Each structure stands twice: as structure tokens, then as C-alpha cells.
Amino acid sequence: MIELEGVPELIDPVMVAAFEGWNDAGDAASTAVAHLDKEWKGEVFAALDAEDYYDFQVNRPTVWLDGGVRKITWPTTRLSVVRVGGDKPRDLVLVRGIEPSMRWRSFCNELLGFAHELGVELVVIMGALLGDTPHTRPVPVSGVTSDPDLARTMDLEETKYEGPTGIVGILQEACTHAGVPAVSLWAAVPHYVSQPPNPKATLALLNRLEDLIDLRIPQGELAEDARAWQLGVDQLAAEDSEVAEYVQSLEEARDTAELPEASGEAIAREFERYLRRRDGGGPGPVAGTGQMGGHATDGGDGAAYLRDTPSERTRPPKPQPQPRPEDDTKDAKDHEDAKDHEGGQGAGDSGSGPESGPAGDDGSGDAKGDDSGPGDSSED
């Protein structure tokens, strides 16, 4: 039964949800919702009955002491509301919990009941999955929807995924069938450094959410945490030559797949984000790069990668060496002859802009975002 006592009438509410478990590589998505709750001091107004949806042998309750009195916290999904002030105030309904063990349809129907009672206009579900993406590059974040009209109006990708899915995919489809606009945002987490936390992926999801709902989100300490995280991974990779070589191969594949210049839409998106942050003292563009200072993503719709990565993998496989064009002496001679023929004329340089990036990180360019979650069967 839905009880909403004490919840005021909401202004243009958007529901933002994330669930721990299979859909949450590196805890990136659940941490993003927790960040919103912390920064805007969310007030919990409802919690789903844990008995209905969770297997306590899988997600065990915890015991803790409160002034010498033992108390139990049960695994569940909680809903809180935050009001964002400014010239255009609006409310966010935050849903944070654990992927349920059973009765998924009832679970989704109960959340949709809250959405209906609160007048929610849009549902945004965040997830994170393991991908062949280097930690040194902006985190790819894809926005997908099952609604073709919503895909056109919000510049999203219409999902074509077929295969196993998690609660993120099920909730999105439930919203679609109920006539509630729904979007899934997926961040790709490097599979070779999948252990939580991953503040860089969390920041990327929040940046994409910020663009989607046109709302300035305070970063708090996330930007600094993301830089420290990348520095730490850099140091670990430098200590292992095979890992360093593998990361370099991912970087080359990513750079080859990306366009030499950012699209006009990507540039406009970065500039709009800068304007939103300027009055609040947020970081501006980094000189000479076109990238936003402290931002872990360029805001583009990078691909989400569905990979079957065994949880016991401790290091990536060493890539096979590829033949290099300069090893062919004939090509080298032809190159020298061409230079002599040009007689000092330089080839035109088209230059390059900030990274906008197509969908691919693995060099193929044909990977697409999906609504399922990580490709392995184990919980992240």
C-alpha cells in the first residue's frame, strides 16, 4: 500500500533510480544516486517491504548497535525526495536499493505506483557495466530508451538489445508499457579495474544526467576523487608492463575510432554545461583541450559494452602484436619517393577538436548501448 504522508506537492518531478548488484559495475550508478541524496539532503519518505522482494541468504541484513541497543537494517529499496532550488526549482525522486531477488514485476509496479501518485514526468535509470575501455579516456556514457519518439526528441539511442537483462531493463520496459517516459544511462567501466568505487564513472553518469534534465548538479569532492582514482590506476598499470601495454592498445583503439573533431552538438553541450557551472564556481574548459575541467566525460553518447568477463580475471590478456606499415621496406621507399615529388609542399592539417567520440571503444565502432547490464552472471 502506498502512503505519501508528509510529502509536499512536487514541482516537475523526475525519478532517478539505481540498484546495486548486476547492473552496477564499480558501484558507479548507486554511488551517483547516493551523491545526489547527500548533496541535496534527501528525505526518505518510503521503503519497500524487504520480505516481498529479497532473499536474505543472498542479501543479508546487518546488525548494529545504537546506544547499546542492537538494531537490524534490512536490505530494501528506499525512496527519497529532494528539491533543487534556483530560477527554475524542481524536485527529484531518488530511488536507491538492491536489485530484487524475486517478484520483479510486482517490484516495478510498486515503483510505478509511487511515480503515478507523485506526478513523475520522467524516469531516469542509471547503470554501469564492464567494457573494453581505457581508464585514461573519458568514460563512455550511453543514453538509451525503448520509446522511438523519446529517442528523437531527447537525442537518445533506441535500444535494440536482445539477451539477458537486469532490473534496469525490466523497469525501463515497465515504464514504457505504462506510458511513463523512461531513459537508461549506462557508464562503461574498464573491466581490468572493476573493483568499487569508481568515482570517474560516477561523475560521468552525473554529467550525463545533468545534460539530460538541464539541471546543475554539485560535484562536491567527486572531481578530485576521480582525478585521484585515475592517478592511482596509472601507478598500478605502470608497475606491470603487460597491463600498461594492454591499456595502450585500448587507447589506440579508442583514439582511432573517435572522430578528429567534436560534433557541433557535443561542443554546444560542453558550453551549456560550462554556463550552468559558471555562476556556481564550477570548473570551466581546460585551456587547449576543449574539455571541461574536472569532468570525466565529454557528454557524448559513447557505446556501452556487453562483455562476458570472468570475475576471477586478475589481469587482461596480452594483445597480439600487429604488423606495422613502416616495416614494409617497399612502402617506406614509396613514401620517400612521394616526399621528393611533393618538393616541400606540406599536406593540409585539418586539426582536431575536443573528443566527441562515436559509439565504439574497441575499434570496431559498431557496439551499441543496451538496457541489460554487465554480461557476466555474477553480481558486481
Image (tube, helix red, strand yellow):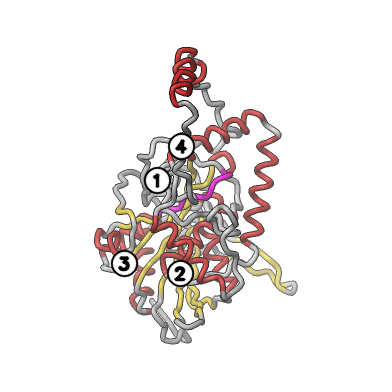
Q: Position of residue 173 (x, y in %)?
A: 31, 58
Query: N-terminal of the two: label 1 or label 2?
Result: 2
Q: Which residue is mark 4?
A: 256
Q: Which residue is mark 2?
A: 48
What is the crowding at mark 4: few (fewer than 14 residues within 10 Å), some, or many (at least 20)?
Answer: some
Q: Are marks 3 and 4 in contact (CB under 8 Å)?
A: no
Query: N-terminal of the two: label 3 or label 1?
Result: 3
Q: Amino acid at mark 1?
A: Ala
Cα separation, mark 3 vs mark 1, equals 23 Å
Query: N-terminal of the two: label 3 or label 2?
Result: 2
Pair 1/4: label in front: 4
Cα separation, mark 1 vs mark 2, equals 37 Å
Query: N-terminal of the two: label 1 or label 4?
Result: 4
Query: N-terminal of the two: label 2 or label 4?
Result: 2
Whether the magenta-drawn stretch holds residue 141 is answered as yes
* Towards the viewer: 45 or 82: 82
Give the extent of the magenta segment.
135-142
What is the crowding at mark 2: few (fewer than 14 residues within 10 Å), some, or many (at least 20)?
Answer: some
Residue 86: in sight, yes or no?
Answer: yes
Q: Which residue is mark 1?
A: 359
Pair 1/2: label in front: 1
Cα separation, mark 2 vs mark 4, equals 47 Å
Which residue is located at x 56 percent, y 26 percent? 318
